[in-house]
Image (cartoon, rainbow, N blue to C red):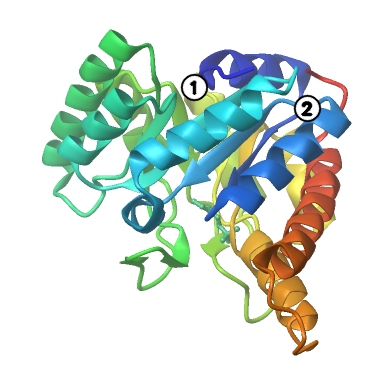
Amino acid sequence: MYTTSKEMIRRAREGGYAVPAFNAENMEMVQAIVDAAEEMKSPVMIQTTPTTVDYITREMACAMVRAASERATVPVALHLDHCEKYDDVVKAMEAGYSSVMIDASKLPYEENVEVTRRVVESAKNYGVTVESELGTVGGKEDSLKSAGVIYTDPDEALDFATRTGIDIFAVAIGTSHGFYKGEPKLNFELLEKLRATIDVPLVLHGGSGIPDEMIRRTIELGISKVNFATELRAACTSAVREALRDEKIIDPKKFMGKGRNAVKELCIHKIKLCGSNGKA
Ligand code: 13P
C-alpha cells in the first residue's frame, strides 16, 4: 500500500513508537525492506539520497517502491532524503515521491526558512509530507559532509517550524551519519526540551551504530521516525562479499539474493527496536 508518510508518523507519535525509515540503493534493498515490514506488520519509509537518485533515477525509485508496495498490505512511503535544492525536491514530487526532506541548512538562516517554506507550499499541491532539519547531524551522508555536530537550538527550532509549516522535524542531538568511532553521546535533555517546545513529530538521523537502548530512550522521549542507512549498506555488502568468495558464482541473483536476505533480517531487528511491529 503506497502512501504518504504524514499519517503513519502521526499515528506513531500518538502510539509512542517510531516509524523506521530505511535507505535503499537498489531493487534488492527495496524488496528486503518491504518484505520485512510486511512480515512484521509495520508501517515503513524507504528513502533515497540524491546520489542514489542520480544512480537509479527518480522514476525507477518510484516504480520499484510502488511495485513492491502494491504487493504489501502495510503502508509504505517513498522519501527523498537530504535534498539541498528546491528544484530537485519538486522533481521528486512530480515523479511520485510521497515524502521529501529539504535540507537547506547550508544557507543563511533566513534563506533556509524561505526555501523550506516554498517547498512546503509546493508540497501541498502533491499531498506530500515535508521534513527539514536544523542544527547539524555529524558525519557524512551522501555528498553532505559535516565538520561536527551542531545541536538544534529549541528557540530557533520553534521559529523555524512555525514559519515554514514543515510536517516533520529532524533534530541534531549528537547523532552522526555513518558508523561511530566511540560510544555515541546523545543529549537526551535537549531532546526532552525540543519535544516540549515544538509541536511537530521529531526525526532521529544517524541511526546506524547507536546502541539499541539509546534508540529506545529517544523514542520514549518523543522521536517518531528513525533513519537507518549505513548498517543496511554494510549488511548487504558483507553478505555479497561473502557469497562472491565462491568464484564459480556468475549469476547475480545468487549473490544479490544473499544481500537481500541480510538486509531483510536487519530491518526486522530495527522494526522491533522502533516498536512499530504490529502497528500497520
Ligand atoms: P546512518 O547512515 O548513520 O544510519 O544515518 C542514516 C540517515 O540519517 C539518513 O538520513
Residue under numbered circle 1: 200
Q: Quadrant of residue 120?
A: top left
**Kind of residue indicated by mark 1:** Val
Residue 76: mark: none
| Residue 159 appears in view | no
Q: At 34% from the left edge and 47% from the top edge, which residue is drawn?
A: 57
Measuring from the top left, give residue 110's x and y in whole percent.
Answer: 13, 37
Where's the C terminus, which quadrant?
top right
Residue under numbered circle 2: 42
Determine whether 70 is above or below 67 in the image.
Answer: above
Q: Residues within 10 Å of mark 2 (few under 14, many from 20)?
A: many
Q: At 40% from the left edge and 59% from the top edge, which residue is drawn?
A: 150
Measuring from the top left, give residue 242's x and y in whole percent.
Answer: 78, 81
For this rendering, which residue is in front, 252 or 172?
Answer: 252
Measuring from the top left, give residue 25's x and y in whole percent.
Answer: 52, 55
Measuring from the top left, give residue 19's x and y in whole percent.
Answer: 67, 31
Give the Cα distance between marks 1 and 2: 22 Å
Secondary structure category for the residue under label 2: loop
For this rendering, which residue is in front, 142 or 217?
Answer: 142
The reply, left or right, for residue 141 in relation to residue 144 is right
For this rendering, which residue is in front, 151 or 43?
Answer: 43
Determine whether 11 is above or below 233 in the image.
Answer: above
Secondary structure category for the residue under label 1: loop
Report whether the residue tagged 1 is closer than 8 Å to ligand 1: no
Determine whether 194 is above or below 199 in the image.
Answer: below
| Residue 225 appears in view | yes
**Kind of residue indicated by mark 2:** Ser
Report whether the residue tagged 2 is closer than 8 Å to ligand 1: no
Q: Quadrant of residue 41?
A: top right
